[in-house]
Amino acid sequence: MNAAVNEVLIIGLGLIGGSLGKALRRSGFCRKVVGYDRNAMELAAGVSLGVIDEAALALPDAVASADIVVLAVPVKAMERVLTDIAPFLRADTLLTDVGSTKSNLVEAAGRILGELPPTFVPGHPIAGSEKSGVAAADAELFRRHKVILTPLPNSSPEAVRQVARMWLVTGAEVLQMEVRRHDEVLAATSHLPHLLAFSLVDTLAQEEDSTEIFRYAAGGFRDFTRIAASDPVMWRDIGLANKQAVLKQIDRFTAGVARLRAAIEQGDGETMTGIFTRAQSARQHFSRILTSTAYSQAMTTRNVTFHVQPGGTVNGTIRVPGDKSISHRSIMLGSLADGITEVSGFLEGEDSLATLQAFRDMGVVIEGPYQGEVKIYGVGLHGLQAAPGPLYVGNSGTSMRLLTGLLAAQPFDSELTGDASLTKRPMERVAKPLRQMGAQIETAEGGRPPLKIKGGQSLTGIHYDMPMASAQVKSCLMLAGLYAEGQTSVTEPAPTRDHSERMLRGFGYPVEQDGNKVTVESGHRLQSCQIDVPSDISSATFFMVAAAICPGSDITLQHVGINPTRIGVINILRLMGADLELLDEREVGGEPVADIRVRYAPLKGIQVPEDQVPLAIDEFPALFVAAACAEGETVVTGAEELRVKESDRIQAMVDGLQTLGVDIQGTPDGAIIRGAGKLGGGVIESHDDHRIAMAFTVAALRADGEIKVNECANVATSFPGFVELAQQVGIKVTKEEG
């Protein structure tokens, strides 16, 4: 057997040391696993149970011959063991450990060894059980668990790689962290919960009726206190070894319990709701992190691919998720209002949830969402609090741009950050006019995120002529204008969506409109209200286009928002010859809605009117597909905004449609598409852009081969459940997650 490592010595054959030995033996990582333990019976059991290959009877000899030495003893015993083995360590022997605290070990190693050797790489597997001893050793203990390495400044890269490889063969995920940060994080996530469990059980055990208490304890008590069955001596040592970090977390917890106690004593239900909803949200977020579905993870870590088979028809009556733009604004304005705002139809997509979490982080109590229902306990225009850290908004450009305007006027400093895709998008377009109002905003290179916003600035209203039509820039400045001295007005070169204006009026805040100019002034208040979020016309577009291009199709989309600033897609499809009807037109909460019925009819190419482009800017990926299936030439101009969305949408659609055999030519502000009627199959790169991914899913209806769409994880940002709904109406799409 060829192995890079000859001999691993594990000092301490408890649960962790024994499980590591067993996993290394099974993996073939080294030629021999040697164990040492002061307990002769445990050592003998390690051999008989197949945990180790050989028992070391003399520690000096075992250390001298080992390629890797693993300290798997209790943290308070580490110093004694280091003293015993120091004279026998070879210069090339790798030294690591499994301890739950790191600062004390590093300090002791420096004192005992004279200087920290480059072969020393501290480590900590985040795995365990209430069971102990070598008999509990489990070769699967570390699989799908994290191991944190805390390399020192002088740790050699080769040593770090070798120790990481040792843990990787056990099935663990290996991460790296600075020593002090490790101890702070573990004090909060591991040490404090264990100490609380011990304390709770000890406290209740001293009650006179403790037998009755334990007899009737429910599952929650059993789950929480299970860890109080762990080794008391080990946890005593951990508490003492990580004393300062643990005390800091105990103090924070004590303050939190005091706030809850005061709320209960005073009958303060809103404060209690805030504590419970924030905790529920955090716990759900923690669960999503463990299953790799949390919005706060970089989307690039989640590999989602759509496989779409050619052909089919789309039929049925469906309701797509709520409008994303309105969902964002309902959270923002509801948080700034006086009183309780109730929202129905809220889009539970990752972008909207990012906005919701940002306001929770700033102290707003928000219940839900539960099946689209959200209740927001507004704090008023001046009630936001500083977030405990940077506000992470995932992939949501709307969240970042609108929040920048709002945060520029707050008394506290803020930082806005997002995922890898968002950090490539331009933010100077909002930072520049906000600076003219008196804001202090720092951007990263190229005017991109993260954004650092200095609090306590006095803003002054300005008039701003937007160089490019953008509802996000307009809304950003309007939100800043709620706080700025005097009037803030924005003139846009072409109409954009007016959800902010409509919703501000719905909350009782006056907004003046004169053609393409909108004006707000400070000094007014927002009053809570009820909001019914209509279905998102951008999401409905994919099914509208699907029915328009596919013979035999007939689909009805219910309760779709048809705001006049958003109906460009309806107007453009009608100009192309689509059979599209608006049914039961009505107004809900100040927003016009209708049911939209689309039946197949042959489409023809057109020159898209430039005045319709801003009214359909998010719908163009799907419209490019419609143009590719139309007869004749379609020309799009005035759409340069598409180049600075989640991707360069013009180039992404040109590349993808060319892959499918379409005659398409990109231009600086649009494209020329010569309809092919029938499309081919192929592999499409969506560039992590949700609308590109969904557009090419629809394209398969007119393809003669399978379309594979890569990088589709971000579809969840705007359209959770897209694949399932597409399957329901007849699109042959499946999702592969890796």
Image (spheres, rainbow, N blue to C red):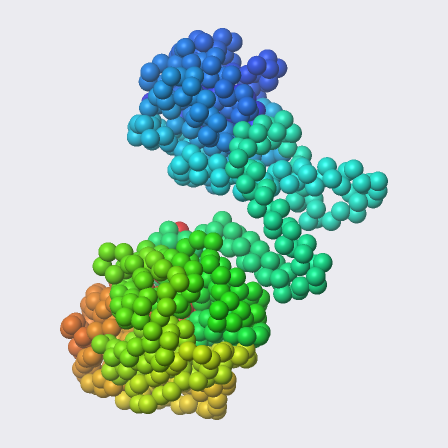
The answer to whether 357 is drawn above or below residue 663 in the figure is above
Q: Nearer the viewer, residue 563 or 721?
A: 563
Query: The N terminus lies in which quarter of the figure?
Result: top left
Residue 464 shows in this picture: yes
Q: Nearer the viewer, residue 51 or 475?
A: 475
| Residue depicted at x 20% and y 85% | 607
Give the mark count: 0
| Residue depicted at x 42% and y 28% | 122
Residue 323 shows in this picture: no
| 370 left or right, relative to 522 | right
Q: Nearer the viewer, residue 516 or 143?
A: 516
| Residue depicted at x 63% and y 37% | 195
The answer to whether 634 is drawn above or below residue 21 in the figure is below
Q: Quadrant of residue 662?
A: bottom left
Horizontal and vertical percent position of residue 219:
70, 48
| Residue depicted at x 37% and y 22% | 116
Q: Nearer the viewer, residue 626 or 587?
A: 587
The answer to whether 180 is drawn above or below residue 110 in the figure is below
Q: Quadrant of residue 409?
A: bottom left
Horizontal and vertical percent position of residue 325:
41, 74
| 196 left or right, relative to 128 | right
Horizontal and vertical percent position of residue 50:
53, 21
Horizontal and vertical percent position of residue 649:
25, 68
